[in-house]
Amino acid sequence: MKNIQIAIDGGAASGKTTAAKGLSRRLGIPVLTSGIIYRAIAFWMIENKIDFDDEKGLALALIKIDLQIIITRDDMRVIIDGYDVTSKLNDNLISKSASIVSKLGTVRNYVNGRIGELVSQSSFIVEGRDIGTVVLPHADYKFFLTASDEVKAKRRQAELLARGETVSFNEIFEQVRGRDKADKEREIDPLKKAQDAIEIDTTKWTAEKVIERMAEYIEL
Ligand code: DC
């Protein structure tokens, strides 16, 4: 049977992860969140004191990185050098750092290579910024989620609060906007809607409604 590929792209806090998880429960297809891999690389670079500007050193170090990606029906975990680092990847510092390192071609090639390996083995809902445009241009279904900056900042603030991080609304608002701007304007594989993607504005919708709308398009 052919592996199914569902691409979900969108900016920071556009509702991708919630939508991907809900769709996953409905369809029984696991989620591959590409942002987690970018975050893991940023975390590993910080831990190993690899300069964000040293792309040559990074390329050499990446050859030896021991990074395992474990995806189950309802979870994705990243193990680096034998340690599960998944719970450390949602901090604000890592969000900012991931956006910076994701500009590097070396990092993007590495991440895309890992995604390629996984999708060749099984069906996946793949979530990110450039999945429908670059990573899986022939995906069976493509969605592009958007939301207003205010709603995105509120969602991100709630997410951080749930993790015990208190950051002011204004600071988060600027961060989310700044990250989206950087992701849209970067030279390599920027955040962009694929021409054939279905765009869904999630600003006024509940997660359930977004998932319902997406499911309407999918025939398995
Ligand atoms: O989806 P996220 O917020 O966890 O992603 C963190 C950063 O990783 C995001 O700011 C940009 C980068 N990223 C990317 O460049 N391409 C992807 N496909 C996914 C994430």
Image: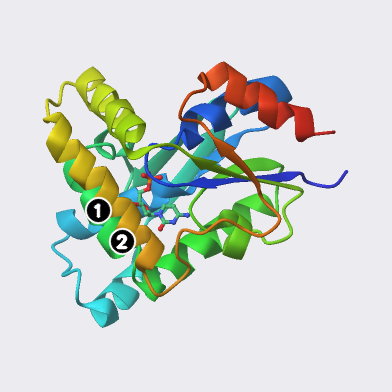
Callout 2: CB less than 8 Å from ligand 1 = yes
Three-letter amino acid code at the position of disc 2: Ala
Q: Residue at x 40, y 42 (%)?
A: 78
Instruction: Determine the secondary structure under disc 1.
Output: helix
* 3D distance between C-alphas at marks 2 and 1: 6 Å
Which of the two residues, 54 or 182, is positioned nearer the viewer here? 182
> Where does the image place residue 8, in percent across and percent down from the top left?
58, 44
Q: Which residue does the numbered mark 1 point to in the structure image? A: 178
The residue most toward the bottom is: 56
Which of the two residues, 197 or 141, is positioned nearer the viewer here? 197
The residue most toward the right is: 1
Three-letter amino acid code at the position of disc 1: Gly
* Quadrant in which the N terminus appears: top right
Callout 1: CB less than 8 Å from ligand 1 = no
Which of the two residues, 164 or 86, is positioned nearer the viewer here? 164
> Where does the image place residue 215, in percent across and percent down from the top left?
72, 28
Left or right of residue 33: residue 12: left
In the rendering, which numbered label is found on residue 148?
A: none
Q: Which residue does the numbered mark 2 point to in the structure image? A: 182
